[in-house]
Image (cartoon, rainbow, N blue to C red):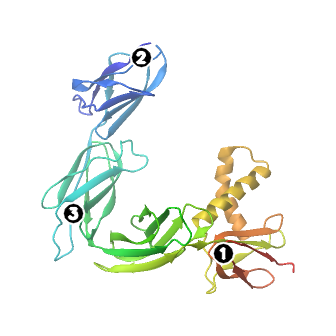
């Protein structure tokens, strides 16, 4: 075998400050002045060499036995900015700013924290070019953490402004019923902006508190990892330094199977006429049925099947299949309205049961 060795420099030709060097399955050694060496690999064998300098990553393909290799990182990028608060509020103590690379940015996550000064200004140096999520926070504060996406080029400095909002809380109580598994509690902005808040909790049910959320309307959902249980969702409004409350109870879900003419267009609405949304568990189960249907139709390539699953699910939700069956799965028990070609029909889905409707009768 033979080793690979060399040195790394930055975009200005200065020695790089390497933190580690890797080839597949093996960590190398780094030394002063950006020098590095790897373990033994077969002479002439092509391997990927990964060099790390802080959050920056450089990957090159090199042959075993190569010596005096010179690798240059691109010029460092920087992000600077300032964190502010609403009028009449005071910048919180313990302020920190994080900088995380987004998907596609060739940098080691989670990314460096910024140097933050008492007036709220901050700076992050030594970044690879790319797109970053910059966020601010303060432990124990009731300010909602601001988040911004910033793109920065090699050798350049991007600027960003972050502004705290006075946040509010959501208090959630959960009756686990007979459920013994963990569940996931999440709150998402109705308008689709901002982060998804939540954590995995364990019954019995709380109350649990999601803290320091930006003011606005949120959809709160509670779901389990165990099949056959549903708790639904609730919409609440978060106000500055207020507490919005909602309560959930896990119940056994039910399935609905409708027999109709093949290709019949069907849909399910609630008692108020609103379409019944497709939950995560239902989408997973329909996905398994769609996968099998595509295989039965003669598709054998996994990549092709995967690309066709979502369109197949949408088709399954819209029309009865070739066998005349139409399904809605993992529904909350209760009364629904089936909108069908021959006229609307009220259906009652029972807890832990499969409700069957034959439109031919």
Task: Give SS at disc 2.
Answer: loop
Find the distance from the CA under tag 1 to the CA under tag 2. 63 Å
Is residue 137 left or right of 229 when viewed as pictured?
A: left
Which residue is pictured at 23% across the width and 33% down the height?
Answer: 12
- Residue drawn at (61%, 87%), measured in percent from left and top? 272
Total labels drawn: 3
Residue linked to disc 2 = 40
Which residue appears at 38% of the width and 80% of the height? 244
Q: Quadrant of residue 5?
A: top left
Quadrant where the image shows the C terminus: bottom right
Local packing at callout 2 (Cα closer than 10 Å; few below 14, some 14-19, many 20+) is some
* Cα separation between marks 1 and 3: 51 Å
Q: CA distance from mark 2 to mark 3?
A: 49 Å
Q: Position of residue 123 (x, y in %)?
A: 20, 51
Measuring from the top left, give residue 310's x and y in whole percent. Answer: 64, 59
Is 193 left or right of 323, judged from the image as shown?
left
Does residue 238 appear in the picture of this structure? no
- Circle 3 SS class: strand
The residue where tag 1 is placed is 351
Q: Between tags 1 and 2, which lies in front? A: 1
Q: Secondary structure at mark 1?
A: loop
Say which residue label 3 marks.
83
């Amino acid at each position: 075998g033979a080793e690979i060795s060399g040195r790394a420099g930055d975009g200005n030709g200065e020695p790089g400050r390497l933190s580690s060097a890797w080839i597949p399955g093996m960590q190398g050694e780094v030394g002063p002045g950006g020098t590095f060496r790897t373990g033994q690999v077969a002479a002439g064998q092509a391997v990927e060499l990964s060099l790390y300098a802080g959050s920056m990553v450089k990957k090159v393909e090199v042959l075993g036995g190569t010596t005096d290799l010179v690798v240059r990182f691109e010029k460092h990028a920087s992000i600077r900015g300032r964190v502010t608060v609403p009028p009449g509020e005071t910048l919180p103590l313990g302020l920190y700013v994080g900088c995380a690379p987004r998907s596609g940015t060739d940098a080691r996550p989670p990314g460096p924290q910024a140097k933050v000064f008492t007036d709220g200004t901050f700076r992050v140096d030594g970044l690879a070019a790319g797109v970053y999520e910059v966020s601010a926070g303060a432990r124990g504060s009731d300010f909602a953490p601001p988040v911004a996406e910033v793109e920065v080029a090699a050798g350049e400095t991007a600027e960003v402004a972050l502004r705290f909002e006075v946040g509010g809380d959501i208090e959630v109580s959960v009756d686990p019923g007979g459920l013994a598994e963990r569940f996931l509690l999440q709150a998402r902005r109705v308008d689709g902006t901002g982060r998804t808040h939540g954590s995995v909790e364990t019954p019995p049910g709380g109350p649990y508190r999601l803290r320091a959320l930006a003011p606005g309307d949120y959809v709160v959902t509670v779901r389990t990892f165990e099949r056959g249980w549903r708790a639904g969702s609730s919409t609440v409004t978060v106000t500055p330094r207020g507490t919005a409350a909602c309560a959930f109870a896990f119940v056994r879900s039910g399935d609905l199977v409708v027999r109709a003419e093949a290709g019949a267009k069907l849909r399910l609405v609630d008692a108020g006429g609103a379409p019944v949304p497709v939950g995560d568990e239902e989408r997973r189960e329909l996905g398994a049925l769609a996968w099998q249907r595509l295989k039965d139709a003669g598709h054998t390539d996994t990549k092709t099947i995967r690309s066709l699953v979502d369109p197949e699910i949408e088709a399954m939700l819209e029309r009865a299949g070739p066998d005349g069956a139409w399904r809605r799965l993992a529904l909350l028990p209760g009364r629904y309205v089936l909108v069908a070609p021959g006229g609307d029909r009220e259906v009652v889905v029972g807890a832990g049961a499969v409700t069957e409707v034959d439109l031919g009768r």
